[in-house]
Amino acid sequence: MTENEKTKKVQVEISTEINQDGNVERHHFEENGQLVTINGNRYLRYVEHVTGQPDVPVTYRIGKDSIRLTRAGENHLELHFKPNETIEDLYRTPYGNLKIGAHTTSIKQSKDAQTGLEIIEINYELYTNGQKVGDYRVKLQFKC
C-alpha cells in the first residue's frame, strides 16, 4: 500500500426503493466492505450476497459532486450520478448490451462528526432506450 492509498473496513447498510408504474419494491442489505482512499478519491466496496444468485462485487466511487456505481457480476452495470444531469451508459449482459441512462434528481451526503456514520442518498430516474423504467432511491450508511 502506498502513502496515497488507505483502506478501512466498514459495515455497509444498503436500502433501495424502486417505483415502477406505481409498484414499489424495497430491499435492505447489510454487508461487510471496505472504504478505500486512493489519491484523494474514495471508493466504497462490498460484495452483494443474495440467496440463490451469484455474488456481485459492487463499488461506489464517491466524489464531491458525483458518484459512480459499478456492479461487476455476470451482468456489468455502471451508472454515473450527478445532480440534475442524465448520463448514459451500457448495461452489459451475456445476451447483449442495453443502452441505459440515469437522471439524478438529488444526491445528499452527510457525516456525523461524533459517531463517524456516513450517509449517502441518491435519487434517480432510470431509462432504457429512452423510456423511463422507474424512480429509484438508494441509501448507503457506513462507518469505519
Image (spheres, grey):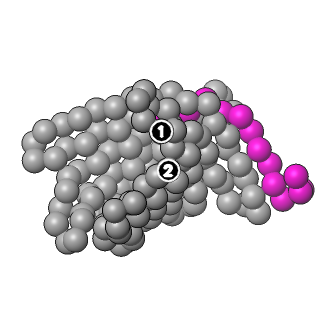
Q: Nearer the viewer, residue 123 or 58?
A: 58
> In the figure, is residue 3 to the left or right of 56?
right
Please tell me whether residue 101 is drawn above or below residue 22 in the rendered image. below
Residue type for callout 2: Gly
Please tell me whether residue 134 is drawn above or below residue 111 in the rendered image. below
Q: Nearer the viewer, residue 72 or 82?
A: 72
Marking on residue 54: 1
**Snapshot quadrant of residue 41:** bottom right
| Residue at 10% from the left image edge and 42% from the top image edge | 22
Residue type for callout 1: Pro
Magenta stretch: helix, strand or loop mostly = strand
Q: Secondary structure at mark 2?
A: loop
Residue 92: horizontal and vertical position, in percent? 40, 64
Q: CA distance from mark 1 to mark 2?
A: 8 Å
**Snapshot quadrant of residue 99:** bottom left
Residue at the farthest front position: 95
Please tell me whether residue 91 is drawn above or below residue 139 in the rendered image. below
Residue 71: horizontal and vertical position, in percent? 49, 52
Residue 1: horizontal and vertical position, in percent? 88, 52
The verdict on residue 4 being magenta is yes
| Residue at 63% from the left image edge and 52% from the top image edge | 43
| Residue at 67% from the left image edge and 40% from the top image edge | 34
Q: Locate the C terminus and report the quarter of the image it occupies.
A: top right
Q: Are marks 1 and 2 in contact (CB under 8 Å)?
A: yes
Mark 1 Cα within 10 Å, few/some/many (few <14, many 20+)?
Answer: few
Residue 7: horizontal and vertical position, in percent? 77, 44
Q: Which residue is mark 2?
A: 73
Q: Earlier in the sequence, mark 1 or mark 2?
A: 1
- For the record, the magenta segment spans 1-14
